[in-house]
Image: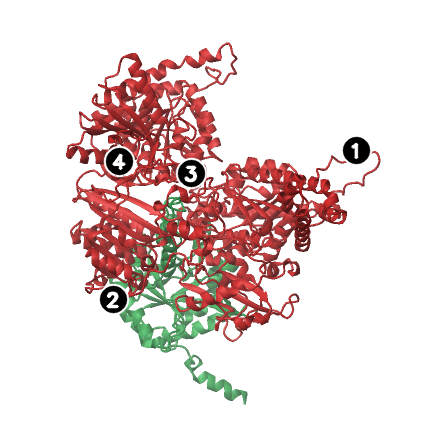
Chain colours: A green, B red
Amino acid sequence: MNLSTTYIGLQLPHPLIAGASPLADDMDTVRKLEDAGAAAIVMRSLFEEQLVMEQMASLRHLDAHEDAHSEAQSYFPGPNRFSLGPEEYLDRLRQIKDAVRIPVFGSLNGYTPGGWLDFAKQMQDAGADALELNVYHITTDPDQSADAVEDQTVEMVKAVKAQVSIPLAIKLSPFYSALAHFARRLDHAGADGIVIFNRFYEADIDPEELAVTRHLKLSDSGALLMRLRWLAILSEKVDASLAVTGGVHTGLDAIKAVMAGAHAVQMVSALLKHGPQHLDRVHSEMAQWLEDHEYESLEQAQGSMNLIRCPEPQGYERANYVDILQSWE
Amino acid sequence: MSITRVMTVDGNEAVAMVAHRTNEVIAIYPITPSSAMGELSDEWSAHGQCNIWGALPKVVEMQSEGGAAGAVHGSLQAGALTTTFTASQGLLLFIPNMYKIAGELNAFCMHVAARSIASHALSIFCDHSDVMACRQTGFALLASGSVQEAHDFAAIGQASTLQTRVPFLHFFDGFRTSHEVAKIESVDDDDLRWLIGDEGVEHHRSRGLTPDHPHLRGTAQNPDVFFQAREAGNPFYLACPEIVQAQMDRFAERAGRHYRLFDYVGAPDAERVVILMGSGAQTAEEMVQWLTAHGEKVGVLKVRLYRPFSVSAFAEALPPSVRRLAVLDRTKEPGSIGEPLYLDVVAALRELRDAGNSPLEVDPLVMGGRYGLSSKEFTPAMVKAVFDELCAERPRNHFTVGIVDDVTHTSLSVDSELDIEPDDVVRAVFFGLGSDGTVGANKNAIKIIGEQTQLHAQGYFVYDSKKSGAMTISHLRFGPRPIHSAYLVRKASFVACHQFAFLGRYDVLDYAGHGAVFLLNAPYPPDEVWDALPREVQQTILEKELRLYAIDAYKLADELGLGRRINTLMQTCFFAISGVLPRDEAIAQIKKAIEKTYGAKGHAVVARNFEAVDRALDNLHQVRPPTKITTGRERPPIVPAEAPDFVKQVTALMLAGKGDLLPVSAFPVDGTWPVGTSKWEKRNIAQQIPVWDSDLCIQCNKCAMVCPHAAIRAKVFDPVRLEDAPPTYKAVAYRGAEFTGSHYTIQVAPEDCTGCLLCAAVCPAKDKSNPRHKAIDMAPSRPLVETERENYAFFLDLPEADRTQVKLDIKGSQFFEPLFEYSGACSGCGETPYIKLLTQLFGDRALIANATGCSSIYGGNLPTTPYTTNGDGRGPAWSNSLFEDNAEFGLGFRLALDRHVDRARRLVITLASNIGEGLVDELLQDRVSGEAEIQAQRQRVDELRLRLAKVQTKEARELEQAADYLVKKSIWLVGGDGWAYDIGFGGLDHVLAMDHDVNMLVLDTEVYSNTGGQQSKATPIGAAAKFAVAGKEISKKDLGLEAMSYGHAYVARVAFGAKDNQTVHAFVEADSFRGPSLIIAYSPCIAHGYDLSRGLEQQKLAVKSGMWPLYRFDPRRVQRGEPPFQLDSGAPKGSVKDYMRNEARFRMVEKIDPKRSKHLQRMAQEDALRRYWVYRKLAGATPPAPEPPTSTTPPPPMKEEGR
């Protein structure tokens, strides 16, 4: 069964990609992912903010005590022997590129315009085949309008696109009021791909301690539904490739996502739960289902259930809600 | 001349870079001021930098200098090229091995940054007492006087020892040279190879002990042969001086700098000559050149090779015209006729005369004098004073210069106004705050100027005694000629004050010459700066016609995201104003230096510093002062008027930085110092102080417990006292079971608080509607200081709680008055809360033997002393002896005390008829101690005194003196892990093995904190520290388990941030236990690399992860049929990673080598689990209880009375 797909200009044998996570931190797992047939690997995100915070913390906690007391000119060995920049990440990227033959994507969460640009270039120089720009930003400021939030991202994409030649995919959260419009803006800005949807750590409240705790649950197939809707809405409305992340656990999930319009399907929770070899299982399930249903290729199914082509598009839209209420009566 | 490299380095680095390249084995123990040499060597080896023969020198840190000496000796005996670095007490511990190394004619060159030996006090600063204590060992002594000389002589010494087989001790002045940054020409590898050659090296190696052609060394010899065999080495000593001169000549061929064993500078027909060695000789040379330019016939003889002392070379170097000699020694030998160099000169002249070989025209008068002890300034004016004294009809012998001796009248008077510094040397002084980067920026400035221009540059840095909020003063010189001024700058053309608050405490502008530039970091807009200055400062600015520039550096640094690091901003201003480099070039160089310094630290740091450079000058303003003083606001007095006389007369001057003015009579004759002086120094360094919400407060007293500085306290008191309370004083009804009807206050000491945030962090009482608000919140201090000062004074006057009513738990413990307050410890220090607790529980009857380390520095570094007395005048008696002997020292307290108690008891029995049998029985009865019993016994002793007053015998007088010993004392042996695990372990172990009642408190920071973070055996696996740069591979030594193995000692492991009640119980149990007790206390430290306001969380994580288990081993439990070992923490939960990721000491390893870090983390995890398993087994192990005695069991050993 021909499961090939084109995603952000890259020809992939099938759409299944290992999504951004600590999976790629361990070289054994990386090799297992390749063995399991992953079409590509996305590294975990490099967070500019973390780098900056660590650098400033080092300044505060290490440098601040240098030359402060006559008996101790410093409290730590060798001042410049360790790096707090992206070197560790870039070295890892190079290492993975050396070890596998499949495409390796860098993932970047920038914070300042300069940060996005610098790291993007460095990742390209280190050999990344593509970049996933992880837009992880929770806007809490009531003075910042939706336009302003979107403008920031659009400008950043333009700037990065002007400086790097490898394909760029933008990973978005679901929290945009006019996602279709925003997706088109990104398209015009030069984004090669749009990845939906990012999952944020959830904050929980500890009522005993009166403290905020953080929480990341792995996804399950239920998370897929929202993504299917938006894939279907965006599919064929933008030139950029579409990828899904979150909620793909089975071959059937993957099929649905492709039908909704996804060119690539990322898995994280499923692989963390079941191991890298699960990717191979999902691949087989997909192939089997297409076989059983007498498809010629995956491409035949690609986008078949998007807003434009599916038989009852109102299922994706508002009317569905109205319908359900009436039927209750 | 071979190609040389110009570089700016300090003396330690200049020496280490030669020593590291010319040796194979380096065995050391850290000690100020020599530690850096070992650290640099370790770093270079870790970096793969090889010696000149292509081999990687092996650097090992031993447990003490004694250990290092043994390792060095062994390495030499086995034929490796070996070196070491030490000073002061450490050097003394080398002496036994030095005799052996010399007796065996081992080629060896060691390096010493000469430092005072502790006598009446400890000093980290410079004099020659340590090297002089070695002059009889048979080592050659080679003295350097500058950074360049230290570099050169390190090479010459190494080459010489290999040629002569006489071991060499190369020394240079601690701090004055070791820490002085200067521009030098370095010798490269080719130079060193050429100088050292192969012959000596081959010979050294061939002498190495090997079974392939074995020898015996270290025989025991008898009266028949020892003497002759001792004399057999004479030829080597006779040949040595000439060979050293030959090496100096060879060195000159390559480097162009020519030295002689004795170097004379001055008039060829000089009549008055001073003789000295070290950096003082540089200063003397400056003065001599100035005087000879004015026609005076004077000179200075600089001693390079002090041992073997070549009388002929000495004679050759002296001008034949000399009539009067002053020999200056930088040491003191009480009881001898004179100091060492003086005696040698006298003997040399005498021998020359007797042999008829004297080249001198007349028999000169020789005077001996002392100078510069413990880095006391030695200035050209003092040299002149010596020359002037030589002009007197009867010059004084055994004089001192540099002090005022109004007791035995040895001191010369010095014209302190004399200033011979040339005008073409730029002199700049910078006042900085320890954490703001001023010193680092100045070091960079020296590098930039030294390496990018033809100018010579010098930097010397003075620090104060505090470990946090400390002041630094940088003395910089730039000039066209090499700078030999080995003394502080006194009249600078540029004075910078980087901390506005200093103007209110110190006479900063005393350093300003007329017309100088004054750069001020002021938190005011430019038009308000002038009015904010104290009157004295305004006056000086006008009088000296200073040019004032101001910048609000903290505001700008904050905007730039640099926190409190203002170094780059101020450095840019310095360059712009001083014009030492053209502005654009200066900026380019500063940016280059930023890249170099911070490049590896990260792009954000570099970017922000670049921006700082770009924006600094826009924010720099020249402030044109008005023509007159506009404020009446004066600098407050250093100490308040109600301070005791000693504090007003002595301490205050020291606090003001004017301690040099104090004469000899101001000081105690034997080093004894009054307690309770830190309360008079109100530092006012907290930007924020705690504010108490009495409604929310749950009255747990944890805030008071965690405070490192006793700057927040709890009290219960009778509410009737509130009638006189100041208007803002807070109090609330006390809700506890004891002290019913009382009121309760949590009160901050606003001027003593350091703003560490620990009290706010520990407070568990959150406002249910607004959890961000707690019963303790931090608020900006400035608006609160006035009122809280008043409140605190009122609080202190409230009576202390009745100790007999206090429950001995964490809450209760904080109602006891702390007798350790406002120390100079770091903000957030993890050690001091334990010490404070100790003084609260036992302070009024405690003797403390304190090992050298952080605890002896914040415990006893002048000007102020933090141990104090209670209302009855009682408090801890505290003493620091040495480092390695602290356990034995404390044992000595116990031995003496037991004799005193014994004596008192015998006297009571002797005087029984006078005292009354009832009271006698009461006094002598052996009861379990506790607050009630202590108080009762004190009352009995008072009663005893009343009765003794009526008795007229000698015994009665003696008993009056000894009566207080009848109240049980608590003896504590306190120190860090450096003492307990390493250098003092032998003593600690021996004391544990005995059965005397002493309590040992180990403040375990898991690293040598005081000397800058070298590893100890307490350093945990995976932590980076000096000498374990890549992360320690070996597990932390389990001191507690070893101690427990004796079975008769009490052992506890505590962490107050994890389980405060267990900590209190451990202290109480240890004190009540009659035998040796050991408490190992987890102490967060800045050397762990994180914000110490999070220290409590880290303590919890340490315990939770299993990295720091809590337990108590109490032998008394065996009697009750219970296992002696009690595990007070649970099974490890979570992973060690959760604990380690928050601390830079572990994080660093991750950054250097992530794979290794993971491996070490895994080992740490396994270790924690394995240890817990062992402890679990112990906790379940109940040894059989001892059998009750029968008639056939032997009687117990005779109990000594009085215990």
Q: Viewed as shown, does residue B979 lie left or right of A43?
A: right
Q: Quadrant of the N terminus of chain B?
A: top left
Q: Viewed as shown, does residue B506 lie left or right of B795?
A: left
Write down the residue under mark 4.
B383
Chain containing the residue with disc 4: B
Q: Residues within 10 Å of mark 2 (few under 14, many from 20)?
A: some
Write down the residue under mark 1.
B1194
Residue at figure coordinates x 76%, y 49% from the top left: B918
Could you tell which of marks 3 and 4 lies nearer the N-terminus?
A: 3
Q: Are marks 2 and 4 on the same chain?
A: yes
Could you tell which of marks 1 and 4 lies nearer the N-terminus?
A: 4
Q: Amino acid at mark 4?
A: Val
Q: Residues within 10 Å of mark 4 (few under 14, many from 20)?
A: many
Q: Nearer the viewer, mark 2 or mark 3?
A: 2
Q: Are marks 2 and 3 on the same chain?
A: yes
Q: Are marks 1 and 2 in contact (CB under 8 Å)?
A: no
Is B1073 in front, or is B288?
B288
Q: Is residue B563 visible?
A: yes
Q: Quadrant of the C terminus of chain B?
A: top right
Write down the residue under mark 2.
B630
Write down the residue under mark 3.
B31
Could you tell which of marks 2 and 3 lies nearer the N-terminus?
A: 3
The x, y position of residue B414, in whole percent, is 28, 40
Q: Are marks 1 and 4 in contact (CB under 8 Å)?
A: no
Chain containing the residue with disc 2: B
Q: Amino acid at mark 3?
A: Ile
Could you tell which of marks 3 and 1 lies nearer the N-terminus?
A: 3
Is B411 in front, or is B1060?
B411
Q: Viewed as shown, does residue B701 lie left or right of B1032?
A: right
Q: Nearer the viewer, mark 1 or mark 2?
A: 2
